[in-house]
Image: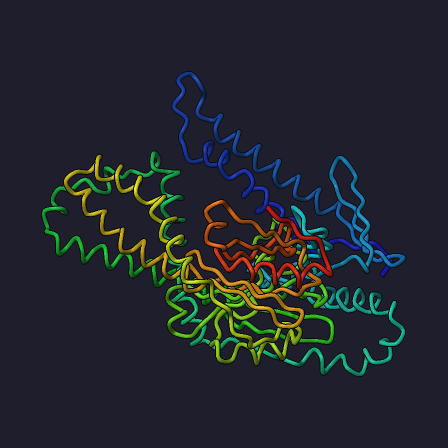
Amino acid sequence: MSDPKRLHPIAVLLNIIKSIKELVIPFLLVVVIPGKNEGIPGWIQPLVIAIIILLIIVNAFLQWLRFTYRIEEGEFRIESGVFVRKKRYIKFDRIHSIDISEGIIQRVFSLVKLNIETAGGSQADAVLSAISKSDADRLNAFISEEKNANNPSDRDEVADNEFAAKSSSVFKQTLPQLFAMAATSGAVGVFLSGAIAFISQFDEMIPFQRIFKDYEDFIEMGTFILTLFALVALLAVYVLATLSMVIKYASFTVIKTDEEIVISRGLLEKRRLTIPIHKIQGIRIMENLIRKPLGLATVYIEYAGGSMEDKESLSIMLFPLIRKKYLQEKILEILPVYETDTKMKPIPKRALSRYVFRKFLYLIPIIGALVWFFRPWGYLFFLLVPLAIFWAYMQYRDAGWSIDGNLLLLSSRFFSKQTLIMQRSRIQSITYKKSWFQNRKEIATISASIKSGVTSRVGMVADMEEKDCLIIKSWYLPEKAVDSQ
């Protein structure tokens, strides 16, 4: 595979789309907003638009023409650049993961997009935006074979176990489970805020006054009609958000091999992510306010990979939705080193007052300002007080820790409950600190961090027994140094 190869010609179209996305704001300013400057001929605007489109097309073609890739001397080599020639050499043993996805355009032409990552960074190390499925599979297999060539004892077993390993499906999310996952995910908030943010960017272009010219008559329809209209609108947004998540995670499947986890999902855009097991740093279990009472959870993998360019690669779902009673069984099948059924040790009862105090410390000034500016209706904001007390109690109740062999478990809650499971050898640092107020109650705060994507994932438990912090410190000290404040 030493001969240089180009991407499929459809990569020209993909480059055009990418350029338009990057230039969407200035392009809209030229295309959408009509020119009103007096003295400028009317043909100027179409000419400017035509020149912009021509430059985008020419640049996209030259990018495709100048982009080549090949495998040579144990390296994946890429040459690119229109005016400045760039050469990138990636050694096989430095490759962390290979991500194969199929966008709508790729699927039409039976192509895939292949991302090669070596470590966390601002972008993927190599992106082949349009290659055939056979070429992608061949590259994946060839790179894996070359990496395994460094282990002679395993070489003979690879061929015998390859088929069985690839076909060992460990977890598959059913369609009813996907709907339950989407319906309880809280995605409606993200969907709604995104729509509002988008509309707010173009409030001067959209003729709201003409659309709602009869809004006075609409308001006179009465509170009941307005409330019904708002509920229908929210229901529509909720359904759209739910359907978008179902489409995104359709056919979600986890396959386990001896050295890798392969996660595939997607209906319109298919994606397959290959994660080396030895790069996994920990497991994160999330339970939001709706799922926790139902005994449901979402599980993520924390691993030393991903890129800022691809946000999803920084937070990888292992199980979009799973019943907690089956969780340990599935973890045992996929990542047995993280299997634990140890009960979490709670924090002391005397810590509850500190959780409540912290909520009031932020809430009282906010309520005071709202009451002052919105009297008399502002007094209704005092209803936030019992909600804050309940929130503080939930955070206190869900805080805890546990040690099981080489595993450290830290549990806490902001809105959703988070349980972070970390191996001692993967922990980057542990921080143990206590304030003057904590010292009086003989309690302290401890946190542990592991590598996750381009940054770190931190698990923290506030106001736990000081002697428990010392137990964790002693457990960790043989391996690493501990920060204390």
Instruction: Name the foreground residue: 69 vs 451.
Output: 451
Residue 341 in view (yes/no) = yes
For residue 355, side relative to residue 329 (left or right): left
Quadrant containing the N terminus is bottom right
Instruction: Name the foreground residue: 403 vs 199.
Output: 403
Q: Is residue 174 above or below residue 108?
A: below
Tell me residue 87's x, y (percent). 81, 44
Q: Residue at x 32, y 59 (%)?
A: 390
Instruction: Name the foreground residue: 420 vs 108.
Output: 420
Q: Is residue 110 above or below residue 446?
A: below
**Snapshot quadrant of residue 363:** top left
Residue closest to the far front: 440
Q: Residue at x 66, y 81 (%)?
A: 168
Tell me residue 47's x, y (percent). 52, 29
For residue 85, side relative to residue 313 (left or right): right
For the image, the number of numbered tags is 0
**Snapshot quadrant of residue 416:** bottom left
Tell me residue 377's x, y (percent). 16, 43
Q: Is residue 378 above or below residue 238?
A: above
Instruction: Name the foreground residue: 464 vs 26.
Output: 464
